[in-house]
Amino acid sequence: MIPFSEVWERIIQNAKKVFYTKKGLKFTYAIQGKTLTTDRTQYPLTQKDVMSAFRHVPLEGPGELTGLVRGQSYIWAILHDTRIRKKDW
């Protein structure tokens, strides 16, 4: 598995681009420091949450992250997008 720092860099590089949840909801996100905020929510998702989810990839869906991270639908969608995962998982 690649280091999380590489994954976080990919996430930073793809900020403001369109992503889709598993249910097909379109969203974008912005990065500020160690937080990620989507245009569909009012609350920030932390780098720590993304890292926690990353430790479990690949996942069938966001439901596998319930209780583990906040914003599981968005974090799952980001981590499973081909621009982020490439061919690493």
Image: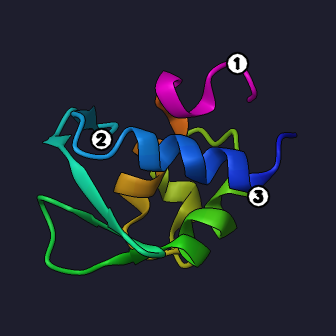
Tell me: residue 40, above or below residue 86: below
Which residue sits furthest top? 87
Amino acid at pointer 2: Thr
Q: Amino acid at mark 3?
A: Arg
Residue 47: say if magenta: no
Where, quadrant-wise, is the C terminus in this rendering?
top right
Residue at point 46%, 30% (across, down)? 81
Label 1 packing within 10 angstroms: few (<14), some (14-19), many (20+) = few
Relative side of 28 to 21, left or right:
left
Query: In which image quadrant can residue 23 be found?
Result: top left
Mark number for residue 55? 3
Closer to the camera, 57 or 38?
A: 38
Pinpoint residue 18: horizontal percent, then vertical percent: 21, 33
Task: Find the magenta span and give its range.
Answer: 82-89
In this rendering, position of residue 44 left or right of residue 68: left
Question: Along the polypeptide, which appears first: circle 3 or circle 2?
Answer: 2
- Rounded to the nearest angstrom, the CA distance separating label 1 from label 2 is 19 Å
Mark 1, residue position: 87
SS type, badge 2 = loop
Q: Earlier in the sequence, mark 1 or mark 3?
A: 3
* Residue 67 visible to an observer of this rendering: yes
Q: Which residue is mark 2?
A: 21
Front position among marks 1 and 2: 1
Residue in the picture at 37% in, 55% down: 73
